[in-house]
Image (spheres, rainbow, N blue to C red):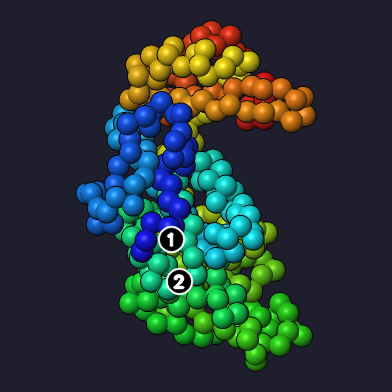
Amino acid sequence: MPASSAFLIRGASSFIGSRSALFRNALCKIHPVSRNHRVPIAPWRCSVSTTDSASMRIKRKTAACIIIGNEILSGKVHDSNSHYLAQLLFNRGIQLQRVEVIPDVEGTIIESVSSASRLHDFVFTSGGIGCTHDDITYDSIAKAFGLTVKEHAETIAKMKEIQPLLDIDGARRRMALLPHPCRALWTPELWVPLAVVNGNVFILPGVPKLFRMMLEANLDAFDAGEGVSQTTRRFVWTKQGEGDYADALRSVAEREVEEIEIGSYPKWMAETQERWCQITVEGDDEEKVKLVTEEVVGLVSGKIGDENGP
């Protein structure tokens, strides 16, 4: 697959070119061998890794999100599902390490999903499960794992139960052709199943409302593990520019790199027409996060706030 076919980010707390101090030298290349073993591959597979400096932290389950659809890549449709998923997983103590947007191309879907399934504990796909010619996600994911697609009797039954007047003898019947075998998870009032393939690939629709409903109804299917808590995150806001505090912040980030992640992000507050910088402090030790946050407040003459502002 050429580089232009996919936009790949690993490390949900960051993005390519991020100012996050933890990721300053973390550019690497990932090979889909196993969830825990990584070796270099082709240069277009560059990514940001969140694991290199995390040895002192809780070992968290990891996830990947694959958004499927030409309409996303061409700008016709805005993707909100990956952002929602990132927040949901963070709040559940699961580390989203990879977000990928790919076209409706069978070979690309096969490569991306099979790779992600090997590398991560959970994989969530969005899009391509409708009944039109460009909906090829079920077929492609089935092929990724050497499976076939088969009409799913329980889906047909739920179609009839929930929407008895629905014509299911036409194109809609295609939506019941699921990878076989798969595990079907159900959402109240919906006949579309959340199909789980290969034990860790969750196949979801691209429609944001359905995407969210189906995840929220099946949270027990992807938990962080016993005793694993949410990462603690604190927000500091300052009127200083990044150039005013970059060196001081780097010193703190380098000192605490084994336990704390610090990120800095310029923000424009439309409501007040003011420029602020948001600094985030994250870690598994709540007390440590609190202490570092207080130090950062002093360094930047800042205020403690939340994600929306001071």
Q: Is residue 260 above or below residue 76?
A: above
Q: Is residue 81 above or below residue 167?
A: above
Label 2: few (<14), some (14–19) or many (≥20) C-alpha neighbours in 10 Å: some
| Spot occupied by residue 83 in the image (x, y as percentages of width and height) | 57, 47
- Closest to the observer: 294 or 82? 82
| Spot occupied by residue 292 in the image (x, y as percentages of width and height) | 46, 16
* Residue 224 appears anywhere in the view: no
| Spot occupied by residue 306 in the image (x, y as percentages of width and height) | 63, 26
| Spot occupied by residue 69 in the image (x, y as percentages of width and height) | 54, 65
Q: Report the amino acid beneath label 1.
A: Ser
Specify the quadrant that holds the N terminus. bottom left
Mark 1: secondary structure: helix
Distance between the alpha carbons at the discs numbered 1 and 2: 9 Å
| x 37%, y 38%: residue | 50
What label does residue 5 carry, if any? Answer: 1
- Closest to the observer: 77 or 255? 77
Q: Is residue 296 above or below residue 88?
A: above
Query: Which tag, 1 or 2, sits closer to the chain's start?
Result: 1
- Closest to the observer: 83 or 90? 83
Q: Report the amino acid beneath label 2.
A: Val
* Residue 53 appears anywhere in the view: yes
Label 1: few (<14), some (14–19) or many (≥20) C-alpha neighbours in 10 Å: some
- Closest to the observer: 140 or 168? 140
Q: Is residue 177 left or right of residue 30?
A: right
| x 22%, y 49%: residue | 39
Would you say the residues marked 1 and 2 are in contact, meaning their CB atoms lie under 8 Å apart?
Answer: yes
Q: Residue furthest bottom?
A: 169
Mark 2: secondary structure: loop
| x 54%, y 59%: residue | 73
Specify the quadrant that holds the C terminus. top right
Which residue is identified by label 2?
105
